Image (cartoon, rainbow, N blue to C red):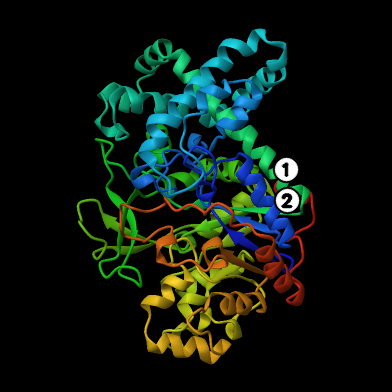
């Protein structure tokens, strides 16, 4: 898709300085939209919004369809009358990094309390009548995933594990009588899960509407694979490479690369693409329909896996031993276009990219990605520098998987430093804004900057280190970061590089 010349900022919702020790859809998110508008930005890129799983990674979600309850604003639930303001007054404030244990022990119980209050009051309270009717409509509209997700979430609590393969045999194999018994016993908690998904959807829709009023588009992220410990695999085992005991036969990952000498053993189960193709890729159609309802533009993480994916035997301890298996990517996306119409997609085509991957992206007319940090090590990396960009690209100074640009500078050597200064001139130890200007002045259709780079922060602000399972995803923006001078500095670059455009006309996509 041809986007208009524009620019934007990468910041995950959890990184906002919201009340309650994790970023959410509350006032801080709306304040960030005001900052983006003042800075003349038209894209806000977020990471996957799914409930997080192992290591709190949004790329290891417990559902490809559900929203993360952690991101619901308790402040807005109090405004709605779902919970008394005094009940949420003792939560941690807006500063500091996310403490996930605090969320699980303090915020989550309050969310369930608010959901229970809504169930008790809404059917009889005239002030909540509108929300009650919208909740019922939401449950009917999203029933294809919502029922399974609510049941899965209840079972995780009941058996104290997300590893559904360890549940009783009749439950993991989804015996209808056994599931009906659970549903009868846990009716209220299942309804609370549905209420929280409704609250998530409502607050997210309100935030998107506020963004759209400023011509700001949400660029969301869809991971190609799903977690083994997810409602998706439990509810749809027939479309994944599982054995008779419902254990993975082969798993996903990537071979040794820039990030890891032993590759990355992700552990996600692989799709049975032959089964999906015979079914008209129905699960993927549902998934992309849901993604289009959440986002204006969709970034496809690990796009190369739609051309060929790295298949690792499940009993291998690293990703070194594996093989490339061809995937029916063209057939999949042609089916999606036929059923859903044109989709505003961006291909994350980083890493080991072979001609078949480029051919697939070009056949589908998707913009690819370029990351300036990758461009300075040697001549073979110059494809990531602006003089080799083509218009059909989205340019980044760095991504959520990179160190911050200032952090990267501090750990790189003389070769990279000399190359940066040869391109942009002397930086006096501060390369971030010269590289932001370099990305902005390129021919790339869209230019994206992580918030950490706008603030010139070091490695302490890094969001994720690939192949390191713990200690990620917790960074939050310091309070008071959205200054008038910062907005003006970014807006000035927008004006001189002609990026003050909505990526596409209001109302054409993402509805």
- In the image: residue 154, left or right of residue 216: left
Residue at the image position 63 percent from the left and 28 percent from the top: 141
Q: Horizontal and vertical percent for residue 370? A: 54, 73
Which sits in the foreground, 48 or 86?
A: 86
Q: Is residue 13 above or below residue 494?
A: above
Kindly state the secondary structure of the residue where label 1 is placed.
helix
Looking at the rendered structure, which numbered label has been put on residue 209? 1
Q: Horizontal and vertical percent for residue 178? A: 34, 16
Which of pointers 1 and 2 lies earlier in the amino acid sequence? 1
Q: Is residue 265 above or below residue 212?
A: below
Q: Is residue 361 above or below residue 58?
A: below
Identify the image quadrant of residue 165. top left
Badge 2 crowding class, 10 Å Cα cut-off, few under 14, some 14 to 19, many 20 or more, is some
Residue linked to disc 2: 509
Which sits in the foreground, 357 or 126?
A: 126
Looking at the rendered structure, which numbered label has been put on residue 155? none
Query: Label 1, label 2: how many angstroms apart (C-alpha)?
Result: 13 Å
Q: Horizontal and vertical percent for residue 290? A: 59, 41
- In the image: residue 160, left or right of residue 381: left
Most distant residue in the top direction: 124
Residue at the image position 60 percent from the left and 86 percent from the top: 387
- Split into 4 quadrants, where in the image is the N terminus? bottom right
- In the image: residue 311, left or right of residue 352: left
């Amino acid at each position: 898709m041809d986007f208009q010349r524009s620019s934007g900022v990468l910041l995950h919702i959890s990184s906002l300085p919201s009340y309650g020790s994790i970023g959410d859809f509350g006032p801080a998110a709306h304040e960030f939209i005001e900052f983006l508008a003042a800075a003349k930005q038209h894209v806000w890129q977020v990471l996957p919004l799914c409930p997080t799983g192992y290591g709190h990674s949004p790329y290891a979600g417990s559902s490809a369809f559900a929203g993360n309850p952690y991101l619901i604003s308790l402040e807005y639930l109090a405004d709605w009358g779902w919970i008394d303001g005094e009940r949420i007054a003792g939560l941690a404030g807006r500063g500091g990094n996310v403490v996930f244990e605090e969320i699980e022990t303090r915020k989550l119980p309050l969310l369930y309390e608010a959901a229970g209050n809504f169930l008790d009051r809404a059917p009889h309270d005239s002030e909540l009548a509108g929300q009650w009717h919208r909740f019922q409509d939401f449950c009917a509209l999203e029933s294809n995933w919502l029922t399974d997700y609510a049941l899965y979430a209840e079972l995780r609590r009941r058996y104290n594990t997300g590893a559904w393969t360890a549940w009783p045999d009749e439950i993991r194999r989804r015996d209808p009588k056994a599931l009906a018994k659970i549903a009868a016993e846990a009716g209220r908690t299942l309804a609370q899960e549905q209420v929280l998904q409704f609250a998530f959807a409502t607050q997210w829709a309100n935030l998107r509407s506020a963004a759209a009023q400023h011509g700001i588009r949400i660029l969301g992220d869809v991971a190609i694979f799903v977690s083994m410990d997810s409602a998706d695999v439990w509810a749809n085992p027939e479309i994944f490479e599982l054995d008779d005991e419902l254990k993975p036969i082969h798993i996903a990952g990537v071979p040794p690369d820039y990030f890891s000498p032993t590759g990355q053993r992700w552990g996600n189960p692989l799709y049975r693409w032959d089964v999906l193709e015979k079914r008209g890729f129905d699960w993927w159609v549902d998934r992309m329909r849901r993604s289009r309802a959440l986002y204006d533009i969709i970034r496809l993480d690990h796009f190369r896996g739609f051309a060929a994916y790295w298949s690792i035997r499940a009993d291998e301890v690293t990703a070194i031993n594996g093989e490339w298996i061809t995937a029916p990517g063209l057939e999949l996306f042609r089916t999606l276009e036929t059923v859903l119409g044109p989709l505003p997609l961006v291909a994350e085509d980083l890493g080991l990219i072979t001609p078949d991957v480029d051919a697939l992206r070009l056949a589908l007319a998707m913009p690819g990605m370029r990351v300036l940090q990758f461009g300075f090590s040697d001549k073979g990396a110059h494809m990531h520098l602006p003089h080799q960009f083509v218009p059909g690209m989205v340019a980044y100074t760095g991504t959520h998987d990179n160190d911050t640009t200032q952090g990267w500078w501090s750990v790189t050597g003389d070769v990279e430093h000399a190359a940066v200064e040869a391109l942009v001139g002397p930086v006096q130890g501060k390369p971030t804004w010269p590289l932001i200007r370099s990305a902005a002045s390129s021919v790339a259709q869209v230019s994206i900057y992580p918030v950490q780079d706008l603030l010139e922060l070091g490695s302490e602000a890094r969001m994720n280190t690939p192949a390191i399972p713990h200690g990620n995803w917790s960074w939050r923006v310091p309070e008071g970061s959205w200054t008038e001078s910062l907005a003006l500095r970014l807006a000035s670059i927008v004006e001189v590089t002609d990026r003050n455009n909505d990526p596409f006309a209001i109302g054409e996509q993402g509805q």
